[in-house]
Image (spheres, rainbow, N blue to C red):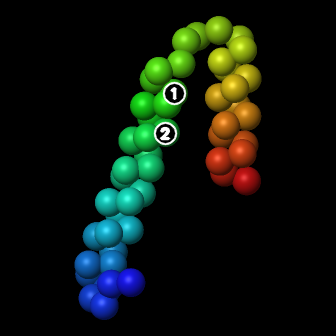
């Protein structure tokens, strides 16, 4: 827990950016087959719902 609101906001934004980068790299590593397309849709649904 961070005592200063400004630091808490910065830490939250940095964590969100880190997670977004990881999601981006995961998609970039995959091939373009139909199987991986369904895998991406499944990962999106599981990750967001």
Please identify the quadrant where the N terminus is shown: bottom left
Q: Is residue 49 left or right of residue 31?
A: right
Q: Is residue 1 left or right of residue 4?
A: right
Residue 35, label in figure: none
Q: Secondary structure at mark 2?
A: helix
Q: Count residues near mark 2 (Cα–Cα under 10 Å), then give few for <14, some for 14-19, many for 20+.
A: some
Q: How far apart are the two marked residues, 1 and 2, measured between alpha carbons?
A: 6 Å
Could you tell me residue 35's position as x and y percent? 72, 14
Could you tell me residue 12's position as x and y percent? 38, 68
Identity of the residue furthest to the top in this view? 33
Residue 2, compared with residue 13, is above or below; it is below
x 71%, y 11%: residue = 34
Give the labeled residue for mark 2: 23
x 35%, y 63%: residue = 13
Could you tell me residue 39's position as x and y percent? 69, 26
Residue 12, compared with residue 16, is above or below; it is below
Mark 1 near mark 2, Cβ–Cβ under 8 Å? Answer: yes
Residue 4, compared with residue 34, is above or below; it is below
Give the labeled residue for mark 1: 27
Could you tell me residue 16's position as x and y percent? 42, 57
Q: Secondary structure at mark 1?
A: helix
Q: How many numbered marks are there?
A: 2
x 55%, y 12%: residue = 31
Quarter of the rendering containing residue 15: bottom left
């Amino acid at each position: 827990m961070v005592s200063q609101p400004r630091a808490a906001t910065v830490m939250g934004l940095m964590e969100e950016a880190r997670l977004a980068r990881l999601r981006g790299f995961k998609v970039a590593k995959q091939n373009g087959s139909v199987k991986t397309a369904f895998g991406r849709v499944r990962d999106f649904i599981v990750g967001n719902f």
